[in-house]
Amino acid sequence: MNILLHICCGPCTIYPLKVLRSAGHDILGLFYNPNIHPYAEYQRRLDTLKTYAREESLELLIAKGYPVERYFRGVAYKEEDRCGHCYAERLRYAFSEAQERGMDALTTTLLYSRYQKHDLIVAIAESLSAEYGIPFFYHDFREGWQEGIRLSKERAMYRQNYCGCIYSERERFCKD
Ligand code: SF4
C-alpha cells in the first residue's frame, strides 16, 4: 500500500519505517507538528529528520509555516488535557493530506513512543479515519522501542528530552 506516515521526529521514525518497508509498503513521510516549542527546537528536530530522510531515501512532505496559534488556541483553559487536542490537530492535517493525495492508508510515529497516550491516539485516528474515508494502519510500534533507541544512538541523531510543547518542557525541567 501507499501509506502516509505522520512523523513527529527522526528518532521515532526509525523503527516504524523499518516495519512498514519490510512489509512491502511505499511510505511518504509528513512532518506537521506545531506542538513543538520553541521554534529553535522545532527546527532542530526537523533538521534531524531531514538528514535521516535523505539517508534513507524517504520522501518527505513538510507542512508550510509554524502555526503555534492553532496549538495554543486548542489547548487554552484545558492544558491538563492538552494531548488529545495535540494528536487531533496533527492527525487531522495528516488525514487531509492523505485524502488529497489518494493514499491507501495513514499511520503515525506517535504509535512508537512509550511516553504517548497510545489508546487515545488510536481512538482519535480511528475517528478521523471514518471521517476522511482513509484507512488507519494500526501497528503497535512500541515493540521496537529499545531497537529504535539503539539505532538512533548509533546514528548519533539528536534525541530530544521532552515531548514537544512548552508545558511538557516545564514538566521535564521545572521542579518547583
Ligand atoms: S505533552 Fe506532547 S503530546 Fe501532549 S500536548 Fe504536549 S507535545 Fe502534545
Image: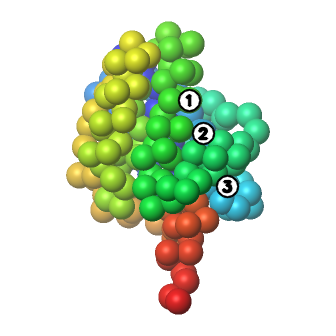
Q: Earlier in the sequence, mark 1 or mark 3?
A: 3
Q: How many marks?
A: 3
Q: Quadrant of residue 123?
A: top left
Q: Judge left or right: residue 64 versus residue 111.
A: right
Dot 3 alpha-carbon crowd within 10 angstroms: few under 14, some 14 to 19, many 20 or more: some
Estimate the x, y position of residue 28 in percent, counting from the top left: 52, 27
100 over 35 or under it: above or below: above
Determine the CA span between mark 2 and mark 3: 10 Å
Nearer to me, 36 or 10: 36
Q: Does dot 1 land on a helix, a strand or a loop?
A: helix
**Callout 2 touching callout 1 (CB < 8 Å):** yes
Q: Earlier in the sequence, mark 2 or mark 3?
A: 2
Q: Which residue is mark 1?
A: 93
Q: Which residue is mark 3?
A: 42
141 over 91 or under it: above or below: below
Quadrant in which the N terminus is drawn: top left
Which residue is located at x 23 percent, y 52 percent?
143
Dot 1 alpha-carbon crowd within 10 angstroms: few under 14, some 14 to 19, many 20 or more: some
Decide if ligand 1 comes within 8 Å of the CB at mark 1. Answer: no
Q: Does dot 3 land on a helix, a strand or a loop?
A: helix
Mark toward the viewer: 2 or 1: 1
